Image (spheres, grey):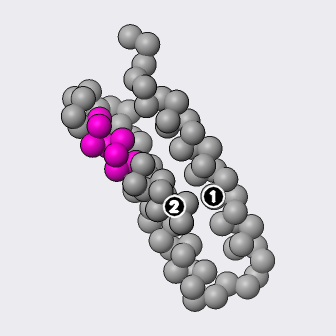
Amino acid sequence: MSGWDGDALAGQMEEVFERQQAAADARAHKGTSTVEERARSAKFETLRLSRSHIMGQLSRATNPAHRKMLESALQSINSKMGE
């Protein structure tokens, strides 16, 4: 088996996540943390944890319908993380 088509997508999403995390870290180190920034950071952390959980499930999923649902959820989370 050569792997599933989502491997490339997962790699791309990981790159996006790393860029977003770096940007969030840069903002956090500015020392100007407003209520809005803290809320945004908390939302991002929640999305990051959800993303991690889904990635773990996706790595173990074998049912095509379940994999499709997980991939859709992952795309949704990545989209929200990019906002």
**Depth check: 74 or 58 in front?**
74
Residue at image location 63% in from the left, 58% down from the top: 20
**Depth check: 13 or 44 in front?**
13
Looking at the rendering, which quadrant does residue 31 occupy?
bottom right
Residue at image location 46% in from the left, 62% down from the top: 80
Real-space Cα separation, disc 2 to disc 1, in angstroms:
8 Å
The residue indicated by pointer 2 is 81
Residue type at tag 1: Gln
**Is residue 75 shown above or below 33?**
above
Residue 17 is left or right of residue 52, and the answer is: right
Residue at image location 58% in from the left, 89% down from the top: 35
| x and y percentages locating residue 48 in the rendered image | 48, 58
Residue 57 at least partly seen: no
- Name the image quarter holding the N terminus: top left
| x and y percentages locating residue 65 in the rendered image | 21, 34
**Is residue 41 shown above or below 8?**
below
**Is label 2 in a helix, a strand or a loop?**
helix
Magenta region, residue range: 67-74
Q: Is 68 within the magenta?
A: yes
Disc 2 to disc 1: CB gap under 8 Å: yes
Residue at image location 42% in from the left, 25% down from the top: 5
Which secondary structure type mostly characterizes the magenta part of the structure?
helix
The residue indicated by pointer 1 is 20
Residue 81 is left or right of residue 66, and the answer is: right
The local crowd at label 1, few if under 14, some if 14 to 19, many if 20 or more residues have their Cα within 10 Å, is some
- Name the image quarter holding the C terminus: bottom right
| x and y percentages locating residue 41 in the rendered image | 56, 73
